[in-house]
Image (spheres, helix red, strand yellow):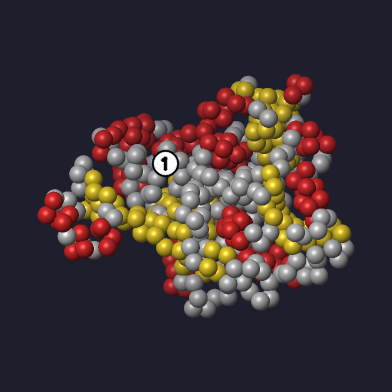
Amino acid sequence: MQRLASEMSIVHETAESLDTRKIDWQATVPSRRFHVRIDLLALLLIIVFLGNILRAQTGRSEKVGTEEQLFIAAQVYSQLQMSLSARELFHPATDGAPYKDYLRKALETDGRHQFDLTTIEFVARLHDGHTFFWDTWLDKSNQPLGFYAAPLGGYWVVQTSLLPGLKPGDVIVRIDHTPAESFFQQQQRYIAASSAAALRHNLFLLPYLFPEHFTLTLDGDRKVTVDREKFKQPEQKTEGRWLKPGVTAYIRIPAFFHLPLEEKALDYVYQFQSAKTLIIDVRNNGGGIPPKRLIQALMGRPYHEWKQSTTLRLPLVDFDQDEEKNKNPTNLPEFLRNCKYSPDDHLCSAPLTWGGGVVEPSPNAFRGRVILLVDGGCVSACEELVEPFKDSGRGVIVGETTEGSSGVPYVYDFHNGMTLAISVKRLYFPDGSEFEGVGIKPDVEVHLTIESLKSGHDVILEKAIELAGKPVR
């Protein structure tokens, strides 16, 4: 969704040829992205999944019956308990209050649209960018806005626009009659995000939160009418060009949702093999299929993988941490030795961690200098591209801190167009420090300004070009 492409994107081509190796795919909904590893057998499950969605789209209903509401709400509650972010929301001390409140609101809804929003709001309370609820029925109200705005200098500022009369650098004062900041405050409860910064960054990536027709009041009391029904989103394409022939080349990758986007980037890497510096622009790249081949093509030195973690929650009604058992901890299975036992719900939570190993570089990797351009819109698979460069120092990262959200979700399909994605794996930097909600900090920090947007100066790219002209240390 990503960055002006907010439509539902279900199954994408595989990251490698269809053989017995494992392959990655990512299904996305507005502003949130996720991927799971599958083998060829799982492709059959994808076909079934697509069939369910197509049936749901051809047999849409404006209402959800009470029985179905109860079933969906119960499944959402029970399935979410496996989320890594669900402990506080579902702690026994809450006495089920958050769920009871959600259930009451869900049963009071009049129509599918409001039921969807109520469920989206409940799931978003986990503040996890890769845990979210989606209904393909909402696609009909998910026509792109035609522009993107984000906070800048205390204002909501247009950063990109394909609409006449609306230009980068324009400050949005009101959306219809509502002040822009008030509009955000009203809508933020529907945004699944791992940080406060991501909440704000993702508002204009969720078109279904906006009216089909609305008026923007800009600074200077200028007005621009947005008619989403008339706007057609252009196809996303990977672009490449020489900035200085034979010396500095530039590749812009808008997303990794479709295999051709990475394929084209790989073509450009090969085309620009003679370059002394290669600038890779992944700003506002909403993720997709982890670009493993692109990493391999660019990484000319060893790097560490992410450390990864999930949580095992086991019912242990008879598990007793009495003094006698504590005398002989070696008699317990290894995962139970680190078990954090909760007497309130008789559950044992034990972390399972792996990863952090060294990945050797490809002998055919690009040997010139690499500069990566990033911002808060670089998320998920985009961050999986950036992290090896941060860990190894292979390239220079320029721009703003990335969003800080990734991880494989478990997907529950309600077979009516609705799905629930639950983050069951968390990524950490190779040294074990937090990544979720933190993001990857650039080596050279450069921020956009209202003035630079209005003047058309890409200050982040300009800084990269400046660095490319300096000798390598």
At horizontal 43% and vertical 66% (from top left) the residue drawn is: 45
Callout count? 1
- Which one is in front, 468 or 455? 468
Q: Could you classify mark 1 by the number of other residues whose Cα lies within 10 Å: few (under 14), some (14-19), or many (20 or more)?
A: many
**Residue at left offset 68%, top offset 24%:** 173
Q: Is residue 59 left or right of residue 71?
A: right
Q: Quadrant of residue 142?
A: top right
**How far from the left and from the top, in percent, is residue 24?**
52, 65
The amino acid type found where label 1 is placed reads: Leu
Residue, disc 1: 126
Q: Residue at x 52, y 28 (%)?
A: 186
Name above or below for residue 125 compared with residue 267.
Answer: above
Q: Position of residue 189 (x, y in %)?
A: 48, 34
Is residue 118 visible in this depiction of the protein? yes
Q: Nearer the viewer, residue 390 or 118?
A: 390
Front residue (pair 132, 272): 272
**Residue that lies at the very extreme toward the left in this rendered image:** 324
Residue 298 location (% of width, % of height)? 67, 66
x and y percent of residue 292 in the render?
A: 59, 66
Left-right relation of 9 to 104: right
Q: Residue visible at 82% across and 40% down? A: 456
Q: Secondary structure at mark 1?
A: loop
